[in-house]
Amino acid sequence: MIEHVSSSDAFLYHYTKATTALDYIFKNRELRFGSYASTNDPKESKAWEFDFGTNENRDLGKYKMSEVSSWLSAELKQRTNLVCFSMDTAPLTGDHLTDIFKRGFSKPRMWSQYADRHTGVCIVFDWKKLAGLIQSQFGSADLVLAGPVSYIDRSVVRDLSAHEYMINVDAMEILGREAYVQTHLRAHYKSLFFEKMIDWRDEVEWRWVVFSDREGDLYLDVRDSVAGLMFGENTEEKVVQDLMDLTEGWGLRYMGLKWKNSSPWYDYGNLRYVQGIKNSGWGTLVRRV
């Protein structure tokens, strides 16, 4: 399942720490949709600053720009939760020897940054099943947005045309503030929530964004959408065994990722990953590729 894949839209990959996987995701069978403002990208975590615009010569002087800007930034961010994944990079040939560099689970920066320096785990999700679960759980009451992240470097200096950081005062006065939030979101959600600087492009990110009036983080029951677990170069043996025990009966594919001479490769020499064998006492085979 993990190795011989020819479709780049079959799976999504979520990197996480071992403690998060053990104590939360697989113990509770839930994946957290965290606050948008708590991400590690300054564009997302810092307050946005909005300008004002009007096509009807409305009196902009009656507004205190900083207050209205802070209000809209908070409304857009505080109601927004998201969960992020890496994708495979097309095209895939099905030849795991050459495809491994395109796979969403073999990104060294992601292992280092999100999986605690290769000691964590990369969860492999069935893309279609995950999408169905998210839509069924959140789609009826909340606004669910999904898509790939675009990587663009935008200048701080913008032209005078309408853009995502400009409040349309005409629309706000007609609709009222509450309704305007949704209108602004629908008009600019791609650039606000699905764009990052080019420096992030190697993440090859797909994300779901849920815009909701619910307080706190959102949680999704993920058991039916998990397809496998990929363990890191430095994932402790006990962590591997505990996660395999927690997910026994889930029908998952388990595999470790090893690095040899700067190249990632599957831990085929470890008998624990052979289907039907999970006893840590089996040890490791010496195997040449």
Image (spheres, rainbow, N blue to C red):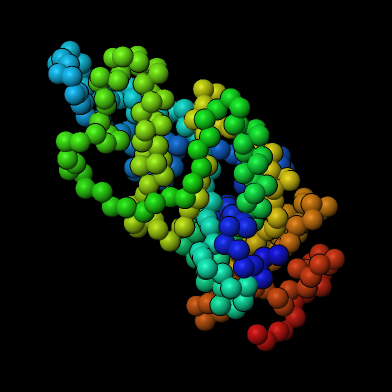
**Residue 220 percent location from the top left of the image:** 65, 37
Left or right: residue 164 versus residue 160 is right
Rendering quarter of residue 6: bottom right
Above or below — where is 201 with respect to 264? Answer: above
Residue drawn 70% across the image and 55% down it: 227
* Quarter of the image where one finds residue 278: bottom right
Q: Is residue 239 left or right of residue 14?
A: right
Residue 223 placement (x, y as % from top left): 73, 45
Can residue 172 be seen here? The reply is yes
Q: 119 and 104: which one is in front?
A: 104
| Quadrant including the C terminus | bottom right
In the displayed structure image, the side of residue 151 where residue 33 appears, left or right: right
Residue at position x 15%, y 14% from top?
59
Residue 196 in the image: state x and y as whole percent: 37, 49
Locate residue 10: give its quadrant.
bottom right
Q: Nearer the viewer, residue 21 or 186?
A: 186
* Outermost residue, front side: 56
Front residue of 160 and 153: 160
On screen, residue 239 above or below 190: below
> Would residue 259 be seen by someone viewing this image from the given angle?
no
Horizontal side of residue 28 vs 52, given as left or right: right
Locate the N terminus and report the quarter of the image it occupies.
bottom right
Q: Is residue 235 above or below residue 185?
A: below
Q: How many marks?
A: 0
- Residue at 41 percent across and 25 percent down: it is 182
Q: Residue at (25%, 20%) from the top-left corner?
A: 169
